[in-house]
Amino acid sequence: MSCDIHLRSDARNNRDRLLTVAREMLATDPHASLHSIAKAAGVGQGTLYRHFPTREALVLGVYRDGIDALVGLAPSLLAETSPLKALRLWCVSFADYSRKKHGIADMVKAAMSEQDFAETYWLMVDAVRQLMTACAESGALSDPIDAEDFLQLLALLMQLPPTAEGRARSERLLSFALRAMGADPR
């Protein structure tokens, strides 16, 4: 989870701005310099290094921030819409996040410890489980699969190329998986 709970508001704003800028810049250029990220975020290099002492720490910060957003999105969507629509919207957000992360995926893997992986992975499984349980309880899915299996399926779909054709195939396969779990195709 996010580690900025105890930061002053100005420090939290700087950290959030650094993460936002780094996410965008690293997605388009995985080799963007830390100096250019700090400059684009409107902070000095000292501020960047205070929050993220290494490039790896910044990459992991971007990754964890995205995971925190996805995990927090599940209950928000369930509060706003039907469970099946919430699951579909969450899957779309997961796909969007995965495409944006694509440029730094290798850096994330290299920087991530087993503990980092376990913490973020199980948070994601819990978010998927929450969505799928709501779908099952509402009758939107008559035969849901295990949440971890569904998350793995989503991860496999993200291996498709980030082209229009790849996105269309991903959407078709997701619809197929939902129908296989008993979702109404309408």
Image: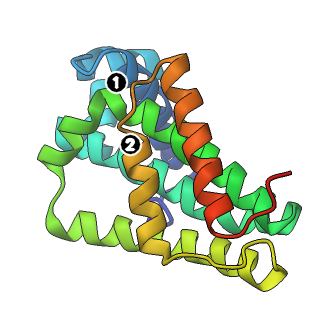
Residues 50 and 137: in front is 137
Q: Residue at x 61, y 76 (%)?
A: 144
Residue type for callout 1: Leu
Q: Residue at x 54, y 47 (%)?
A: 94
Q: Where is 128 relative to 178, above or below?
A: below
- Figure quadrant of the N terminus: bottom left
- Per the rendering, the mark at residue 26 is 1
Q: Is residue 49 left or right of residue 144?
A: left
Q: How is the image coloured?
A: rainbow
x and y, in percent, of residue 64 in the image = 39, 54
Q: Are marks 2 and 1 in contact (CB under 8 Å)?
A: yes
Residues 43 and 21: in front is 21
Q: Where is 138 relative to 104, above or below?
A: below
Quadrant of res 138: bottom right
* Whether residue 142 is visible: yes
Compute the Cα span from label 2 to label 1: 9 Å
Q: Where is 90 relative to 51, above or below?
A: below
| First in sequence: mark 2 vs mark 1 | 1
Residues 179 and 81: in front is 179
Q: Is residue 54 left or right of residue 178?
A: left
Quadrant of res 132: bottom right
Furthest toward the bottom, the residue is 137
Q: Residue at x 53, y 38 (%)?
A: 170
Q: Secondary structure at mark 2?
A: helix
x and y, in percent, of residue 25 in the image = 39, 19
Which residue lies under the disc numbered 2?
62
